């Protein structure tokens, strides 16, 4: 109903909608991560004992932004220097293990089970909330790892492609961190079954856990360390070391496997997903509404009469903007039309305004 310059929305003029949308995870809205870099400054800093940042360009560039972090967790603290040589088993790697144990399992006594394989050490790829929005998108992951920069075993020449098994999962499994899927051999949701019908390794379970709701990928280090000829055990001879009170630079090993694969022409593909709540406002201008301008120059300030006689019998306006007001007549949102729309007593207009949350 029109009331001066305002029209009150009717019961059917406001519609609510909820949609799921998928977007890119990487900077610049790039669909794929085609280059990876680390920072020598960050790697050698205190934080570098716990994780390393991975950038899409040189860390010294002004456009450099962290795309994800790599961490290494070990239940007994192997692979990193002890905090105190008198206290065995307490090191950055044990801290990382406990941190992700709490996040993924919610219990610091629960073991990590990768498929059907229990492991006490793993790698973690973590993404910031601003990148993955509500969750990592299922069936979009394609992470390639090259064995050429890992260990020196027989699997060193193998390139491994990993994805999540959401496309073949018979139902959602929920854990402390929300939905849980297995990381398996494959690409963008397509599972490769050359070594195992479910994409697992023959002997070391799955390649890890895919936790979309917290932006986390845990990789089974034992699976990646497999070193049988031609990768027949599913490994790439990554060469994870578990020495006590020694910096084994395991995080750099995984970064090397990723960077060598990217250098060879492979890319890291993974999307974000979020649920958008939208309100649709149907703004209706009936034939008798909004035919006179509210601009003060339209009428005489002293008499209130129209200044332009030709507008008396056949007035015409051009609608360019829609303003949404609350009950206190406070402007809350503005919608701009792509072009002015002519309005007179012979025309009625319908403008749909969409607000996303």
Image (cartoon, rainbow, N blue to C red):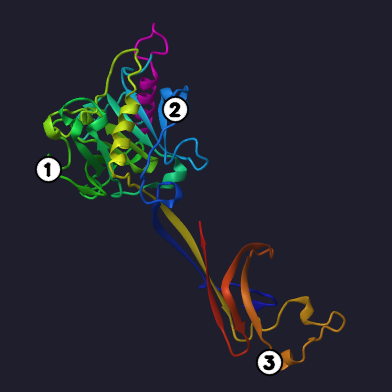
Determine the residue positioned at 66% across, 64% down. Answer: 327
**C-beta proximity under 8 Å, tags 3 and 2:** no
> Relative to 356, is 267 above or below?
above
Q: Nearer the viewer, residue 248 or 61?
A: 61
Instruction: Give the spatial CA distance, label 3 vs label 1.
Output: 77 Å
**Does residue 202 show up?**
no
Q: Position of residue 148 (x, y in %)?
A: 24, 32
| Earlier-in-chain disc, 3 versus 1 | 1
In the rendered structure, are the residues bearing label 3 and label 1 in contact, judged by CB atoms less than 8 Å apart?
no
For label 1, the residue is: 194
Which image quadrant: the N terminus? bottom right
Which percent across, then down, holds residue 242?
28, 18
Q: Nearer the viewer, mark 1 or mark 2?
A: 2
Q: From the viewer's perspective, tell me whether residue 22 is left or right of residue 312.
A: left
**First in sequence: mark 3 or mark 2?**
2
> Where in the figure is residue 165, as x and y percent of width and height?
23, 45
State the separation of the CA atoms marked 1 and 2.
Answer: 39 Å
Which mark is drawn over residue 334?
none
What distance separates the C-alpha of mark 3 from that of mark 2?
74 Å
Query: What range is drawn magenta here?
Result: 82-105
**Under tag 1, what secondary structure?**
loop
- Can you identify the residue that label 3 sits on? 314
Residue 149 lies, in percent from the top left, at 27, 30
Residue at the spot of label 2: 40
Q: Quadrant of residue 112?
A: top left
């Amino acid at each position: 109903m029109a009331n001066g310059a305002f029209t009150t929305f009717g019961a059917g003029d406001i519609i609510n909608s909820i949609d799921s949308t998928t977007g890119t995870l990487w900077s610049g809205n790039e669909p794929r991560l085609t280059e990876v870099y680390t920072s020598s400054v960050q790697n050698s800093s205190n934080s570098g004992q716990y994780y390393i940042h991975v950038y899409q360009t040189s860390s010294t560039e002004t456009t450099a932004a962290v795309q994800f972090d790599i961490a290494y967790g070990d239940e007994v603290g192997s692979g990193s220097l002890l905090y105190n040589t008198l206290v065995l088993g307490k090191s950055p790697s044990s801290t990382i293990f406990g941190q992700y144990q709490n996040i993924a399992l919610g219990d610091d006594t629960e073991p990590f089970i990768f498929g059907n394989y229990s492991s006490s050490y793993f790698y973690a790829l973590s993404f910031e909330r601003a990148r993955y929005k509500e969750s990592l998108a299922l069936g979009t992951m394609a992470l390639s790892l090259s064995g050429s920069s890992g260990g020196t075993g027989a699997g060193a020449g193998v390139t491994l492609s990993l994805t999540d098994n959401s496309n073949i999962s018979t139902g959602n499994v929920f854990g402390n961190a929300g939905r849980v899927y297995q990381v398996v051999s494959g690409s963008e949701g397509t599972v490769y079954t050359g070594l195992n019908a479910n994409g697992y390794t023959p002997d070391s379970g799955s390649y890890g856990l895919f936790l979309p709701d917290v932006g986390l990928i845990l990789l089974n280090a034992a699976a990646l360390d497999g070193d049988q000829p031609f990768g027949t055990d599913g490994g790439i001879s990554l060469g994870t070391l578990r020495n006590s009170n020694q910096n084994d630079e395991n995080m750099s090993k995984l970064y090397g496997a990723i960077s060598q694969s990217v250098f060879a022409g492979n890319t890291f593909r993974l999307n974000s997903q979020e649920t958008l709540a939208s309100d649709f406002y149907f703004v209706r201008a009936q034939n008798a509404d909004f035919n006179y301008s509210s601009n003060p120059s339209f009428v005489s300030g002293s008499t209130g009469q129209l200044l332009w006689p030709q507008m008396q019998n056949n007035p015409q306006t051009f609608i360019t903007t829609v303003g949404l007001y609350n009950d206190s007549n406070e402007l809350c949102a503005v919608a701009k039309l792509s072009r002015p729309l002519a309005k007179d007593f012979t025309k009625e207009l319908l403008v749909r305004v969409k607000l996303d949350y």
